[in-house]
């Protein structure tokens, strides 16, 4: 399973945090706002109740209230504010704003001198609505004695809920806008923070493709040790490669003279002479193999000019066979490796195909899904299935197969292995063999 990039992980984490932050913030603000409104409502209803208390008079057993109250909300029908006064278990007065209602004494009993505030109450006069209620009980002198008089203020919660919902809608809009802006800044910040990482990846890619010999960009201090380690590794690899080539070169020169002397001796048995020639071939092959392969400093090469040169050369070498060599190569294709290695690889494959072909040879090169694919096929006798296995087995003496594809296949197999590629032998639609070689060709 492919792992998410650091950038996507950071953005995903930021989205998750904001997804928790936004509702949590709205809930806190809603609670704070609702509590604040409720306290303000309690203070408002207390003042209205005190207004009723100050305006009320009891003359013997006869209550008196002015026709117009100081609190305007109690004078206006439909204002949502209702006031009533209860004496001796009966409603003796109701505000002008409550003219459309018929009241019975509320089942809210408050001791004399005490107050009660309810933030949710369903009255009998309007059972489908919720009301705020403020109740206060005071004593007045009657014809009998001091008797309790109960004052009630009702306020419909519809306006309160509408105001709260408006606040919630506005809060959600601003929180969403804020989260969007924060996410944009987070993405920009993550991009800036990861810029050195992308630059490091770019420089490593340039060194692997041969455009640079070491990392040169000035990175944050956290990357200094990594930069030094990579540069040290690159220098060590280059030095080891150079020492390896030099050692093999020295070995070849050391063996060249005694081998030449041994080969020039007279009266050597045929078996000894062939063995010395075989040793010479092995030395040359191993030297070539050691010097071939990928290097961190090599640049990509265009394949089309090389194949055109090889095709022209094969036309001249096999002009007596009047072969048709067809090239099917996409434009601007490149091979990331040594030009000599690529030329020798394709030269061997093309030479083998021309040897085996009757009339036609086709060379196709394409790039697909990060792979550079080379296909060389002919219309010759083909390769039997049992020989295909032998040709792909490591260590087999491939030069013993003399029907066209054995010669040079050993070196081709070595080059493919060095460049971390893969080789397949298939049957061609032309009737002969098709050699398929694929190399990693990541951009």
Image (spheres, rainbow, N blue to C red):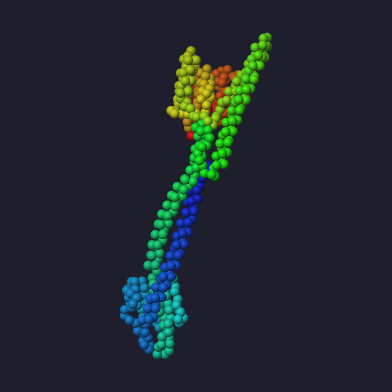
- In this orientation, does residue 382 appear? no
Q: Quarter holding the N terminus?
A: top right
Q: Residue at x 50, y 42 (%)?
A: 196
Figure quadrant of residue 230: top right
Q: Residue at x 50, y 27 (%)?
A: 374
Give the percent coordinates (x, y) of residue 335.
Answer: 49, 28
* Towards the viewer: 214 or 16: 214
Q: Is residue 277 left or right of residue 213?
A: right
- In this orientation, does residue 167 appear? yes
Give the percent coordinates (x, y) of residue 147.
Answer: 43, 86
Q: Is residue 389 left or right of residue 28?
A: right
Q: Is residue 423 above or below residue 104?
A: above
* Towards the viewer: 290 or 129: 290
Q: Is residue 38 above or below residue 184?
A: below
Give the percent coordinates (x, y) of residue 363.
Answer: 48, 23
Figure quadrant of residue 45: bottom left
Give the percent coordinates (x, y) of residue 394.
Answer: 61, 26
Q: Residue at x 46, y 23 (%)?
A: 305
Q: Residue at x 57, y 41 (%)?
A: 225
Q: Is residue 266 above or below residue 6?
A: above
The mark total stands at 0
Residue at the limit of the structure toward the top, as seen here: 267
Q: Is residue 297 left or right of residue 249?
A: left
Residue at the limit of the structure toward the bottom, as seen here: 144
């Amino acid at each position: 399973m492919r792992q998410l990039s650091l950038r996507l992980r950071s953005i995903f984490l930021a989205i998750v945090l904001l997804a928790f932050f936004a509702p949590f913030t709205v809930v806190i603000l809603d609670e704070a706002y609702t509590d604040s409104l409720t306290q303000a409502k309690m203070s408002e209803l207390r003042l209205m109740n005190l207004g009723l208390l100050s305006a009320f008079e009891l003359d013997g057993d006869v209550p008196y209230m002015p026709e117009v109250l100081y609190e305007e909300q109690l004078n206006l029908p439909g204002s949502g504010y209702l006031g009533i006064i209860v004496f001796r278990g009966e409603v003796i007065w109701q505000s002008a704003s409550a003219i459309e209602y018929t009241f019975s004494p509320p089942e809210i009993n408050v001791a004399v001198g005490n107050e009660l505030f309810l933030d949710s109450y369903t009255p009998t006069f309007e059972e489908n609505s919720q009301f705020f209620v403020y109740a206060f009980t005071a004593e007045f002198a009657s014809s009998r004695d001091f008797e309790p008089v109960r004052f009630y203020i009702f306020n419909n919660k519809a306006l309160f809920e509408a105001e709260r919902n408006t606040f919630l809608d506005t809060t959600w809009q601003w929180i969403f806008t804020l989260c969007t802006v924060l996410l944009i800044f987070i993405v920009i910040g993550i991009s800036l923070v990861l810029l050195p990482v992308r630059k490091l990846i770019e420089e490593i890619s340039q060194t692997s493709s041969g455009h640079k010999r070491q990392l040169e960009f000035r990175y944050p201090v956290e990357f200094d040790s990594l930069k030094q380690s990579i540069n040290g590794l690159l220098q060590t690899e280059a030095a080891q490669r150079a020492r390896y080539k030099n050692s093999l070169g020295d070995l070849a020169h050391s063996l060249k003279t005694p081998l030449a002397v041994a080969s020039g001796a007279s009266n050597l048995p045929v078996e000894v002479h062939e063995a010395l020639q075989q040793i010479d071939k092995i030395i040359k092959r191993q030297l070539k193999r050691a010097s071939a392969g990928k290097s961190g400093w090599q640049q990509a090469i265009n394949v089309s000019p090389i194949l055109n040169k090889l095709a022209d050369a094969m036309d001249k070498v096999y002009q007596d066979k009047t072969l048709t060599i067809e090239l099917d190569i996409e434009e601007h294709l490149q091979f990331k490796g040594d030009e000599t290695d690529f030329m020798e690889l394709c030269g061997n494959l093309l030479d083998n195909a021309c040897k085996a072909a009757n009339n036609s040879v086709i060379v196709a090169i394409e790039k697909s899904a990060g792979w550079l694919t080379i296909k060389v096929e002919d219309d010759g006798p083909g390769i039997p299935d049992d020989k295909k296995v032998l040709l792909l087995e490591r260590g087999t003496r491939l030069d013993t197969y003399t029907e066209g594809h054995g010669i040079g296949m050993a070196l081709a197999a070595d080059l493919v292995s060095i460049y971390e590629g893969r080789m397949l032998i298939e049957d061609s639609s032309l009737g002969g063999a098709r050699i398929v070689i694929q190399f990693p060709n990541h951009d």
